[in-house]
Image: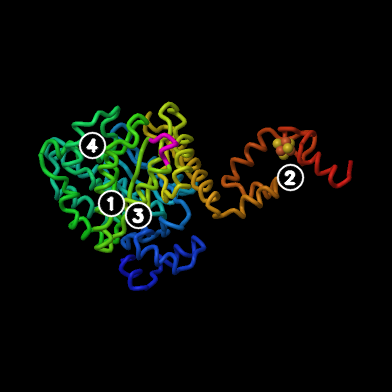
Amino acid sequence: MQVEEARKGRATPEMEAVARDEGLPLKFVLRGVARGRIVILSNPKRKSRVFKGIGEGLRVKINANVGSSPDYVRVREEVRKARIAEEYGADTVMDLSIGGDLNRIRRRIIDATRIPIGTVPIYQAGIEAAKKRGSIVDMDSDDIFNTIRRHAEDGVDFVTVHCGVTRGVVEELRGVKRLLGVVSRGGAFLAAWIIKTGRENPLYEEFDYLLEIAREYDLTLSLGDGMRPGAIGDASDILQFRELFELGKLVKRAREKAVQVMVEGPGHLPLDQVEWNVKIEKTVCDGAPFYVLGPIVTDIAPGYDHIVGAIGGAVAALAGADFLCYVTPSEHLCLPSPDDVREGVIAARIAAHVADLAKGVDRKRDIEMGEARGNLNWNKQFELALYPKRARELRRKRPPSIDLRTCSMCSKLCAIKFLAEFLRGET
Ligand code: SF4
């Protein structure tokens, strides 16, 4: 148990790995874990893996969602997407599969990757209940908790659990006018279940049992935002914050039981609301790691939402968000392809770096890139690039023909070369 060990002042191999990876003193990581400001995704059931720390003072991390849908059940493609995500720099992958043999897909993805894996077990609980009893809302609390346990047993490192979708929040939903009611799949399952049964959300009512399972596997809980705004017109409304305040209380309870916990956040937000949304989460949830979904900062760029998400993600991360869920060009349109996954990861990776850079982390590489550009040292530029292959490809596609030291943008009128020659007195 990471938290228990940290509170006893004992470093685990996972904490040591995170400290090494981040280039930070072990004490810093240990203290962050003890306080719940840092989580380390590390289910001991997972055999081959890389440990990732998420939270205060660490580099911003990014997640890539993969997973089948009822329309597209291609196990090999989902595995491929997970591998592409890892190759292009995702820190974690979430398997959000809802079509086909869910156990098989999850296990294949776990086996095919080394980075931490997250899931949303309520999907499988609902889908299996529908198969057995006719409807998603026929699931019971055993379905939910047994599925969580099954995922943890397979080695899943973190799970999204929509504990804040309480009966009170759902009651409020009836009275609030939203453009897009509930866009969270898990949130919708649970809200419908509450409306049908009139009972309290089992993930909330039996939160202590959930904590027991999490303790058993050192499973990190990612408290889902079932009421996240799904449109700019719904941003920062009462439902979003009503749920967040519930999550703040649950963070405290999880910490009392030494369970690692992070909090998920919006969703769709105009850029001017991003910073204070992050600050509110950090305040209400006592600095718990904040995992933002995008955020999506405009609704009118379908096809380019990976760019939209990267803009929102960079601003959120600069304000203190710790973990960015990528967005792909397919968002709001269709199930992402492997190419979309690659584009989404690249955009989120850049957003995370941009925020880290502004916070003073990893500046050396950017400085060196400036030097390499000043020296027209192309090989060094490729070496320093986040994605060298793409940079090389573009240069090769339209090479300079007059002066090979320049590029074909300005060619013999290259500003860098031109002034440098004057400064050196060569002209
Ligand atoms: S040719 Fe123009 S764009 Fe290319 S390196 Fe020189 S100044 Fe930069």
Span shown in magenta: 269-274
Q: Amino acid at mark 2?
A: Leu
Residue 257 x %, y %: 24, 63
Assess whether mark 4 and mark 2 are in contact (beta carbons under 8 angstroms): no
In the structure shown, which secondary structural element does the residue marked by tag 2 occupy? Answer: loop
Q: Main secondary structure of the magenta part?
A: helix
Protein image colouring: rainbow
The label on residue 188 is 4
Mark 2 beta carbon near ligand 1 (under 8 Å)? yes
Q: Residues within 10 Å of mark 2 (few under 14, many from 20)?
A: some
The residue that label 2 is drawn on is: 376
Q: Which residue is mark 1?
A: 248
- Real-space Cα distance between discs 2 and 1? 52 Å
- Which mark sits nearer the N-terminus, 2 or 4? 4
Could you tell me the amino acid type at mark 1?
Gly
**Which of the 4 quarters of the picture holds residue 207?**
bottom left
Badge number at residue 288: 3
* Residue 381 is covered by the magenta coloring: no
| Callout 3: SS | loop
Name the image quarter holding the C terminus. Answer: top right
Numbered disc in front, either 1 or 4: 1
Q: Whole-Å distance between the Cαs marked 2 and 4?
A: 54 Å
Who comes first in sequence, dot 1 or dot 3? Answer: 1
Structural crowding at the residue carrying mark 3, measured as other residues with C-alpha within 10 Å and reported as few (<14), some (14–19) or many (≥20):
many
Closer to the eye: label 2 or 4: 4
Residues at marks 1 and 4, CA–CA distance in whole angstroms = 21 Å
Percent from the top left, x then y, of residue 302? 43, 28
Mark positioned earlier in the residue sequence (2 or 1)? 1
